Amino acid sequence: MSEASYHHGNLYEELLDRAVAVIGEKGVEGLSLRGLARDLGVSHAAPARHFAAKSDLLAAIVRTAYERMTATTIEAAKAAGEDPIKRLNAMAKASISWAANNRSYHTALMNPDVSRFADDELKAALGIYIKMILEACIEAQKAGLYTNRPLRAVLLYGIATTIGASIIFSDSLLNDILGPFEGEGLIDEIVNQVIPVDIRE
Amino acid sequence: MSEASYHHGNLYEELLDRAVAVIGEKGVEGLSLRGLARDLGVSHAAPARHFAAKSDLLAAIVRTAYERMTATTIEAAKAAGEDPIKRLNAMAKASISWAANNRSYHTALMNPDVSRFADDELKAALGIYIKMILEACIEAQKAGLYTNRPLRAVLLYGIATTIGASIIFSDSLLNDILGPFEGEGLIDEIVNQVIPVDIRE
DNA sequence: ATCGAATGTTGTCAGTGTCAACATTCGATC
DNA sequence: GATCGAATGTTGACACTGACAACATTCGAT
């Protein structure tokens, strides 16, 4: 960390980190490129070298969020063992927990404005996440989950519940009205209802 | 509609309507009080008489959205007849359909920034919606739905799925990746999976 | 060592939210 | 019907923002 050097050295990463923090504190509306520049001690136009527009910064945050959520979910899937249904169950829990534990990222993720500025990289990151879930659904259905339902309905049902639960656990307004929540146990309860692991026991 | 009168006459309502339209076209980020003023032919500071801050406008939109969604859902509940499970099923479908048919409102509804500025009126509107769902859940459980689950889990499960499905059907990015959707049939499919109406048939 | 590319700075511009001071109209009260 | 405070709309101003252009510094491949 040499001080007062002309080049910051790691501005891209630090802009992302700081932006996520600001979104957590003041929301997307309270996020400004100039504010970030001040926080990081660079000139007001420096961020433009990395994000031509504010929307590019938001898109990058969301892409990062999907990538991290995907990574966390994959880890959980591996740790869950061989049973495809237990694996799908664990993946849903991991996604929701990630949202609950990374509220700032998830706040950005769920901002509908971001969809508007989705670039190809963001779409790719989302596509990878969806594909991962789809494949897990296929395996789980082969293993006996919701065999009487169309695959597409099972996929959308699972995604809808996961997204909805993530919002419930990370949105402060819903938290106020519905909460306080009883921690991870409630996530388990909901996911177990969607994806019953004891289906053949 | 006398022209060039000093007082606009219906500025509050028209600001709300136009704001929802703009959100549909350009997102919450693209919404500006001055832009609304121009569109409606009033001075740039006129909106401030009705909404002291931009966040107040957003909160009003969301409150209106909850009120309308609640009204639509209540209608559907009445039309669904006596069976509490069929009624809950119809209510979920109505909420999701409302979101799919009122994308602009729902986009505003799901903007996490709004939670931050939630006023008491907004919280009250949301509270009424939640209370309505809660009571329907209680009745449905008495009638045999998910009797082995805690009420709280059933409530949150239902809300999570409804919110998630609403997002899936109204968010343009997810539409791109998951869609195109097959219309109302898919909503029915998902809701029937969450709230099976044939549980005792 | 050189030189184009990457990165950061300064200056500027139009647009925005918000406030204060002022103007017009509405509506309850006499 | 006239009066006057409240509600509503206007004008002007200020600080802040995103975005762009011109310029400065540093990096890194050759």
Image (cartoon, coloured by chain):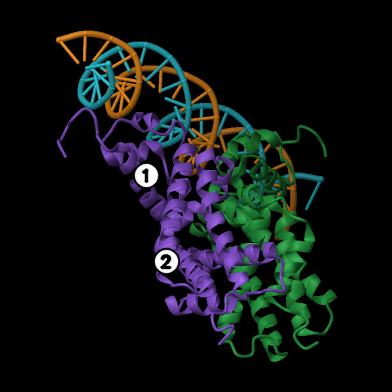
Chain colours: A purple, B green, C orange, D cyan
Q: Percent position (x, y) of residue A4? A: 17, 32
Name above or below for residue A4 compared with residue B14: above
Residue A69: tell me if it is visible: yes
> Which residue, given by chain and number where applicable, does mark 2 sit on?
A78
User: What residue appears at the point 39 percent right and 50 percent down from the top-left corner?
Assistant: A20
The chain letter under disc 2 is A
In front: mark 2 or mark 1?
Answer: 2
Query: Which quadrant would residue A148 be assigned to in this image?
Result: bottom right
Q: Position of residue A78 (x, y in %)?
A: 42, 66
Q: CA distance from mark 2 to mark 1?
A: 29 Å
The answer to whether dots 2 and 1 both sit on one chain is: yes
Q: Is residue B26 left or right of residue B191?
A: left
Spot occupied by residue A116 in the image (x, y as percentages of width and height): 59, 42
Q: Quadrant of the N terminus of chain A?
A: top left
Closer to the camera in the image, A188 or A14: A188
**Which amino acid does the dot numbered 2 rest on?**
Lys
Q: Position of residue A119 (x, y in %)?
A: 53, 38
Circle 1 is placed at which residue position? A16
Q: Indicate the chain on which mark 1 is placed.
A: A
Q: What label does residue B156 carry, if any?
A: none
Q: Is residue C20 above or below residue B103?
A: above
Residue at image coords 30%, 30%? A43
